[in-house]
Image (cartoon, grey):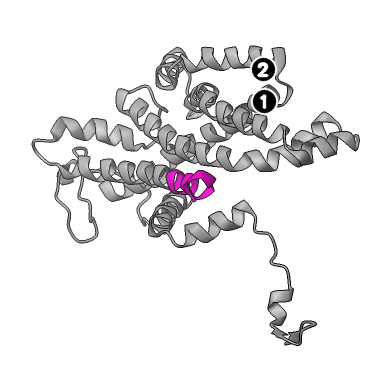
């Protein structure tokens, strides 16, 4: 305890100025109190681990395990909790190994989208003028091309070559960035008029230093939110392309299994329900995670 000039006791902790709290710290404190955040994060981690290390979840390697027609459409039982599909393949192992194709397409497409959106949105928002006008019109042009349709065209054009997931990754990544670029552009426009940016400019900082050291950290939060939501959409796009038969070739995919199972839905429903359920849970997990993070970082909702 200490005292004032009038002799009144004052608590020591009242004399210490409270440290300013950053937006990210406030957002994290709010996220920790949201059960939906922990649920979505747990599902995302589970799906990522499943895609990266499928052997941890299934003792059967769906890529090499033989299928027996004697087990065709056999219902779930001991050792095979999801049953068998029409070809007599274990559905559980195919669901586990099918996560790799969908998640990898989503992750790599999101990385490409984030890089392109960050560069174009940063340049358009920071320089403004004719640079902003040209890049904004480019954003509008690409925004008019549906990513799913573009991916179908690219996949069809490269159908004679076995390039794995990369045609789909490039098509989705190079057509899915306009929304994220608009978000970055708006954040940069708001940040470039702040006093700390003007002070850095007066002290002689160059454009690149100002963009990377002062503006980029304040523009990353909305970009991360948008990319998290887009990642879920890209996973759904990959499954749709695989369902249509134009997705990655010679890979195990939820979309391929759904397309095959829907032909035999009247005989058995479980070959369709399990891959469709995992696909739905994965997409919803990323979308829910993006929504809750967006709410936490939006100061207008506080």
Q: CA distance from mark 1 to mark 2?
A: 7 Å
Residue in the image at 42% along x and 58% along y: 34
Magenta residues, start to end: 289-302
- Answer with the quarter of the image where residue 224 lies: top right
- Answer with the quarter of the image where residue 125 lies: top right
Q: Which mark is residue 125?
A: 1
Earlier along the polypeptide chain: callout 1 or callout 2?
Answer: 1
The secondary structure making up most of the magenta span is helix
Residue 83 image point, x, y percent: 20, 50
As drawn, which residue projects farthest toward the right? Answer: 204
Queried whether the magenta region covers residue 250, the answer comes back as: no
Marks 1 and 2: CB-CB under 8 Å?
A: yes
Kindly state the secondary structure of the residue where label 2 is placed. helix
Residue 55 image point, x, y percent: 43, 55
In the picture of the structure, the residue carrying the numbered disc 2 is 132
Label tally: 2
Residue 16 lies left or right of residue 102; in this view the side is right
Residue in the image at 58% along x and 30% along y: 112
Residue 9 image point, x, y percent: 71, 86
Residue 203 lies left or right of residue 25; in this view the side is right
Residue 109 lies left or right of residue 78; in this view the side is right
Tell me: residue 179, above or below residue 5.
Answer: above
């Amino acid at each position: 305890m200490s005292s004032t000039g009038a002799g009144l006791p004052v608590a020591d902790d009242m004399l210490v100025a409270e440290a300013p709290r950053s937006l990210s710290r406030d957002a994290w404190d709010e996220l920790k109190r949201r059960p939906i955040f922990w649920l979505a994060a747990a599902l995302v981690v589970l799906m990522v681990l499943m895609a990266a290390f499928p052997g941890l979840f299934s003792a059967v390697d769906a890529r090499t395990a033989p299928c027996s027609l004697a087990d065709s459409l056999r219902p779930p039982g001991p050792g095979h909790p999801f049953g068998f599909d029409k070809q007599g393949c274990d559905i559980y192992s195919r669901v586990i190994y099918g996560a790799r194709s969908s998640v990898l397409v989503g992750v790599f497409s999101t990385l490409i989208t984030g890089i392109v959106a960050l560069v174009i949105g940063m340049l358009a928002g920071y320089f403004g003028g004719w640079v902003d006008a040209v890049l904004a019109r480019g954003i509008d042009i690409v925004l008019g091309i549906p990513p799913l349709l573009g991916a179908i065209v690219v996949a069809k054009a490269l159908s004679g070559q076995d390039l794995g997931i990369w045609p789909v990754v490039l098509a989705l990544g190079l057509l899915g960035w306009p929304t994220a670029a608009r978000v970055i552009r708006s954040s940069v426009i708001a940040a470039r008029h702040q006093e700390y940016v003007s002070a850095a400019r007066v002290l002689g900082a160059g454009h690149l230093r100002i963009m990377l050291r002062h503006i980029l950290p304040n523009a990353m939060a909305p970009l991360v939110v948008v990319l998290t939501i887009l990642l879920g959409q890209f996973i759904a796009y990959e499954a749709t392309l695989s369902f249509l038969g134009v997705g990655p070739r010679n890979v195990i995919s939820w979309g391929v299994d759904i397309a095959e199972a829907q032909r035999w839905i009247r005989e058995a429903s479980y070959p369709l329900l399990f891959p469709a359920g995992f696909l739905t849970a994965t997409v919803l997990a990323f979308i829910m995670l993006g929504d809750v993070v967006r709410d936490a970082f939006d100061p207008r909702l506080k």
